[in-house]
Amino acid sequence: MARLVMKFGGTSLADLDHIRNVARHVKREVEAGHDVAVVVSAMSGATNQLVEWCRQAAMLHDAREYDAVVASGEQVTAGLLAIVLEGMGVNARSWQGWQLPILTDNAHGSARILDVNGAELIRRFNEHKQTAVIAGFQGLHKETGRITTLGRGGSDTSAVAIAAAIGAERCDIYTDVDGVYTTDPRVVPKARRLDKVAFEEMLELASLGAKVMQVRSVELGMVHNVRIFVRSSFAKPEDIDSKAPPSGTLICDEGDIVEQQVVTGIAFSKDEAQISIRRVEDKPGVAAAIFGPLADSNINVDMIVQNVSADGATTDLTFTVPWADYERARATIEKAKPAIGFERIDGATDVAKISVIGIGMRSHAGVAAKAFKALSERKINIRAITTSEIKFSVLIDAAYTELAVRTLHSLYGLDRA
Ligand code: ASP
Ligand code: MG
């Protein structure tokens, strides 16, 4: 029978009542004949609490011990779910990352998965019909024998990695929304749920602000071609008709999408800050003098705009960084001033990045131009623009975020009828 991964997020496991509901979902799939590997997050809020305790213990703490602490949230939910499943007559056992093992590198706090051994899970499916309940978010660094964690939201990535390792037919991500939407429905009530979205588009949506899944999980799904299905955990298991196709969003290969729209979705992020360096000397090596130190400080630079200088001597250079890194970025540039040579730094933190995404852009011209016109008609000023093959982003004043998103959502025909 087909193998299935079912992943449940923290809000779906918030307390024992929720855990019982999850167990009924699992039981439903087991009774339908599937071999199931469940991947769980910690109870909602639990990881935040653990992180906070680490901070209170010592602002600067050993990342290996941080991982030992924060990995514990998933150990609790995995064990509890296994207990509840057993009580319902489902043969189940819990697994921690090190027990499988899920091997990672040693980047504690944001480790990458190197290998997942699914052999024992498969043996138990075949010989004992045993359901596996696996603690997400955690792994093992083999050389040091230490527990690692995969970065916030990392249990999505655990789930996809396990799906690849056991050759699952699908990786179901059960969450508090019933799929991936054209944009955030709280901002645009007319946002539509997508039936399908291509890996590449989902990667952009997730990277650019849509918070449905951890970016790395989508990356991993794309590499291993794992079909990921985002669906609601709040639906009552009894109400799901196992014969009808479930409702949700399938993240899949673009070849599996028959009717490709030009624009698939709009993401936005207010966690941006703009830095403009005024009257930078216009000479070779300046960009390196600016962006080298930022990279060394691990600051991610996103949009970059540089003018061709009018006087041949100096120019302005604008770029964006994550809002949280704004002060650090300014200080880094200030420190590198002698090497760079400029007049002053201007900055703004009340900015937002709006991104329009769609694989169809590859073969359609003028998609972005349409947006620029529509935004100007709304008197929304564009501070910076970036484009790539399947998306473009504009940086605007944060106050206009909602208006801009709604305008573009209608413009590209994404509104629900
Ligand atoms: N519990 C972890 C977190 O809150 C991992 C996850 O939920 O995916 O980030
Ligand atoms: Mg999550």
Image (spheres, rainbow, N blue to C red):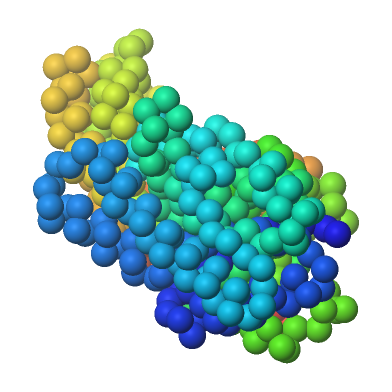
Which residue is at 86% across, 59% downward? 1
- Compared to residue 186, the image places residue 277 above or below, namely above
- Compared to residue 161, the image places residue 10 above or below, namely below
Task: Place residue 189 in its image quadrant.
Answer: bottom right
Which residue is at 70% across, 71% downward? 248
| Residue 133 in view of the camera | yes
Task: Place residue 14 in its image quadrant.
Answer: bottom left
The percent position of residue 197, horizontal first and vertical second, equals 72, 57
Which residue is at 11% across, 48% downward? 58
The percent position of residue 45, horizontal first and vertical second, equals 34, 69
Which residue is at 27% across, 46% downward? 66
| Residue 310 in view of the camera | no
Nearest the eye: 123 or 313: 123
The percent position of residue 382, horizontal first and vertical second, equals 43, 52
- Compared to residue 269, the image places residue 143 above or below, namely above
The percent position of residue 128, horizontal first and vertical second, equals 74, 59
Residue extending furthest front? 127
Nearest the eye: 51 or 359: 51
Give the quarter of the figure containing the C terminus.
Answer: bottom right
Task: Place residue 32 in its image quadrant.
Answer: bottom right
Nearest the eye: 157 or 259: 157
In this rendering, the count of numbered labels is 0
Q: Is residue 257 left or right of residue 326?
A: right
Residue extending furthest top? 284
Q: Is residue 293 left or right of residue 29?
A: left
